[in-house]
Image (spheres, rainbow, N blue to C red):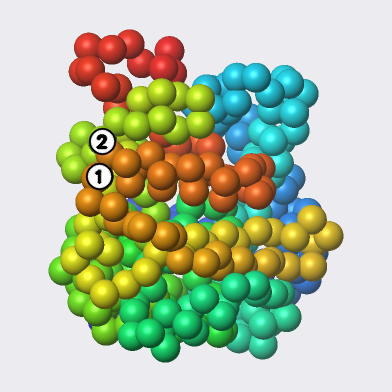
């Protein structure tokens, strides 16, 4: 994807409030130190989730569905951290789009980069099997301090936000829309590292129903199997975590998944969900529980799990 051109239509009055918000975001992330941004973002997120009642209900319900045997107090702690992360990720997005490189490099540590080096040495592309962590946006910028990367993304419905996110992301990564399978395969065949996620509910198309945490039948896309089956690549689990001490982030890359794809999409989806579960459990409060992960039921007449 090429850098988009600015259009005069983006200055229409209906976008003025958005431009004002983006200007305030730029000013805030420019003048405030990182740890203060974390505190301010956490407070904003806690307030936002009190106002966004449907999203708050979804997050609470997802935790109940995924961790039915977990103590309520523990689920509450995860939910509280999740709510703080909602606000923190606003500032992290601004940081990812506008911070200079030297500020980013101070925040990041890595483990497992040798797995990417070995894959490249063997002539393979790398499918970075990620999850929808609140840190995923900033991790794109952080990761490319070491490795050039291609990211799969969903276009935004608002044209100004689409312009801003594409321009912001193209500072550090190449972009491919999520439906452009051919471009993803081509990038992998060229030996590139490509981010991919499969942990949200994308409907019935190209999905199978397999276990996910304590939910026995969750709609799960099989894109990772399709991509690796049709390209010369390996799949490496990828996790980014915001450090508890407020010093930045750690990105870990695990060894290539063995015998993947297996040729059985259902088995592969079941296996990949286990990888997703393990990745989430490394920092459950930083995961995006506010999406309706189980909105697609095995049978169309099945009752909603969200009430």
Mark 2 falls on what kind of element?
Answer: strand
Q: Is residue 123 left or right of residue 105?
A: left
What is the x, y in percent for residue 286?
63, 48
Residue 243, relative to residue 77: is it above or below?
Answer: below
User: Residue tagged by mark 2?
Assistant: 208
Chain-order first, disc 2 or disc 1? 2
Disc number lying in front (2 or 1): 1
Residue at screen point 66% across, 48% down: 283
Q: Is residue 40 left or right of residue 212?
A: right
What is the x, y in percent for residue 30?
67, 75
Residue 77 occupies quadrant: top right
Task: Please state which of residues 268 and 253 is positioned toward the viewer in this rendering.
Answer: 268
Q: Tag on residue 180?
A: none
- Rounded to the nearest angstrom, the CA distance separating label 2 from label 1 is 8 Å
Say whether residue 162 is visible. no
User: Residue tagged by mark 1?
Assistant: 265
Say whether residue 192 is visible. yes
On-image quarter of the C terminus: top left
Pointers 2 and 1 in contact (C-beta within 8 Å): yes
Instruction: Give the class, few, some or many, for how many residues have Cα within 10 Å of label 2's Cα (few <14, many ≥20).
Output: many
Residue 166, relative to residue 298: is it above or below?
Answer: below
Mark 1 falls on what kind of element?
Answer: helix
Residue 119, relative to residue 77: is it above or below?
Answer: below
Residue at screen point 53% across, 37% down: 289
Residue 70 occupies quadrant: top right
What is the x, y in percent for residue 231?
23, 71
On-image quarter of the N terminus: bottom left
What is the x, y in percent for residue 173?
41, 78
Residue at screen point 65% across, 74% down: 110
Residue 63, relative to residue 144: is it above or below?
Answer: above
């Amino acid at each position: 994807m090429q850098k988009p051109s600015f259009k005069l239509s983006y200055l229409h009055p209906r976008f003025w409030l958005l431009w004002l918000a983006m200007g305030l975001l730029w000013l805030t992330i420019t003048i405030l130190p990182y740890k203060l941004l974390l505190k301010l973002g956490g407070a904003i997120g806690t307030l936002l989730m009190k106002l966004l009642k449907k999203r708050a209900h979804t997050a609470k319900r997802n935790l109940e569905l995924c961790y039915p045997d977990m103590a309520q107090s523990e689920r509450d702690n995860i939910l509280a951290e999740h709510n703080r992360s909602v606000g923190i990720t606003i500032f992290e997005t601004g940081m990812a789009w506008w911070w200079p490189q030297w500020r980013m490099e101070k925040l990041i540590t890595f483990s497992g980069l040798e797995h990417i080096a070995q894959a490249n040495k063997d002539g393979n592309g790398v499918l970075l099997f990620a999850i929808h962590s609140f840190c995923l946006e900033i991790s794109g910028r952080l990761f490319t301090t070491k490795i050039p990367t291609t990211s799969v993304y969903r276009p935004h419905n608002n044209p100004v936000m689409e312009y801003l996110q594409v321009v912001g992301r193209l500072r550090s990564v190449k972009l491919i829309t999520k439906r452009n399978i051919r471009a993803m395969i081509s990038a992998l065949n060229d030996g590139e590292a490509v981010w991919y996620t499969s942990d949200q509910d994308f409907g019935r198309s190209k999905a199978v129903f397999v276990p996910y945490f304590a939910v026995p039948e969750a709609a799960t896309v099989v894109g990772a199997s399709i991509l690796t089956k049709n390209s010369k690549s390996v799949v490496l689990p990828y996790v980014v975590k915001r450090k508890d001490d407020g010093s930045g982030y750690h990105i870990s890359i695990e060894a290539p998944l063995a015998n993947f794809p297996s040729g059985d999409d259902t088995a592969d989806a079941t296996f990949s969900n286990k990888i997703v579960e393990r990745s989430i459990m490394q920092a459950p409060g930083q995961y995006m529980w506010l999406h309706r992960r189980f909105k697609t039921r095995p049978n169309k007449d099945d009752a909603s799990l969200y009430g």
